[in-house]
Image: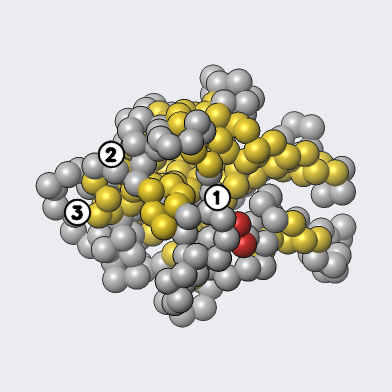
């Protein structure tokens, strides 16, 4: 299954269109594009591997405040693809609780600074990265957001579900710059966002993430299933939209783009430290 964004990259959830293609022969040939609104946008949180019943999950990259007129409780959209992508089940009212109020910004078309729909403001909060199972049977996924009290930089957090994805809540910060604190050396002007994450062979979690076009990729590790994280460090690479996978031999592979073409990098010792 390959997914793609079909609409402009803009702050306008009402105009979002996405699509997916299916291959039955290991990628040699592909189906036509099956178009959707929410559900198949590459900008979201995805199952790192299919669930035991063979389905693939996506937490949509935009969320809705619920109830309205507050910015700490939200509805997620959860889409499940099954039957080789031919059956789709979608719920738009999956509760998400954040640890503090999230910044709200005006919806607009990039480059035009105008609204293009009924939606006027929306939260700067995006599930983005892999959905991974926990040893205790729960689920975890990265999100990034800007806090109302500290809107200058993105904050990268981990959300947890202990009821098979029916409800979620923020559990910990992977990386953030606190109010009044200075960025770590090499961090870009955006702050930590767009994280790839994988579980290492020793059970630790490893996260790599974008920090801005002018900064280096950040990284952090957790040895307790994401409850606490090491202080973020910069890796000597630049990139966006990171995807990290642990291969069958323990090597870590990461894909990223911008600057230049899409590239692959590897951590041959499987730790992410080199």
Q: Residues within 10 Å of mark 2 (few under 14, many from 20)?
A: few
Q: Is residue 77 visible?
A: yes
**Residue under label 2:** 230
State the image coordinates of residue 166 (x, y, percent, origin top left).
Answer: 62, 26
In the image, residue 257 above or below residue 171: below
| Label 1 – label 3 distance at C-alpha | 27 Å
State the image coordinates of residue 113 (x, y, percent, origin top left).
Answer: 42, 71
Circle nearer the N terminus (1, 3) = 1
Circle nearer the N terminus (3, 2) = 3
Identified at 63% across, 68% down, the residue is 7
- Mark number displayed over residue 12: none
On screen, residue 197 versus residue 86, left or right, reads left
| Label 3 – label 2 distance at C-alpha | 13 Å
Identified at 87% across, 57% down, the residue is 24
In the image, residue 168 above or below residue 247: above
- Tag 3, which secondary structure? loop
On screen, residue 269 versus residue 2, left or right, reads left
- Give the tally of numbered discs: 3
Do the residues under discs 1 and 3 have CB atoms within 8 angstroms? no
In the image, residue 252 above or below residue 59: below
- Mark number displayed over residue 61: 1
**Residue under label 3:** 184
| Label 1 – label 2 distance at C-alpha | 26 Å
Q: Residue furthest front?
A: 118
């Amino acid at each position: 299954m390959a997914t793609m964004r079909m609409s402009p990259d803009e702050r306008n959830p009402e105009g979002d269109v996405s699509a997916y293609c299916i291959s039955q022969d290991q990628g040699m040939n592909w189906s036509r594009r099956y178009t959707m609104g929410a559900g198949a946008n590459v900008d979201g949180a995805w199952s790192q591997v299919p669930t035991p019943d063979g389905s693939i999950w996506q937490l949509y990259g935009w969320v809705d405040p619920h109830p309205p007129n507050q910015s700490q409780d939200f509805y997620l959209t959860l889409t499940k693809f099954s039957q080789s992508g031919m059956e789709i089940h979608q719920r738009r009212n999956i509760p998400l609780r954040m640890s503090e109020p999230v910044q709200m910004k005006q919806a607009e078309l990039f480059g035009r600074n105008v609204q293009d729909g009924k939606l006027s403001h929306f939260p700067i909060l995006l599930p983005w990265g892999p959905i991974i199972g926990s040893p205790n049977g729960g689920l975890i996924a990265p999100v990034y957001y800007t806090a109302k009290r500290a809107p200058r930089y993105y904050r990268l957090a981990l959300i947890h579900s202990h009821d098979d994805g029916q409800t979620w809540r923020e559990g910990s910060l992977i990386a953030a710059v606190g109010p009044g604190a200075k960025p770590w050396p090499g961090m870009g002007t955006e702050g930590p966002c767009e994280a790839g994450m994988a579980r290492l062979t020793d059970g630790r979690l490893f996260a790599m993430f974008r920090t801005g076009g002018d900064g280096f990729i950040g990284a952090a590790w957790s040895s307790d299933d994401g409850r606490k994280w090491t202080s973020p460090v910069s890796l000597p690479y630049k990139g966006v939209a990171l995807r990290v996978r642990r291969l069958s031999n323990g090597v870590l592979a990461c894909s990223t783009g911008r600057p230049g073409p899409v590239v692959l990098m590897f951590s041959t010792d499987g730790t992410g430290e080199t």
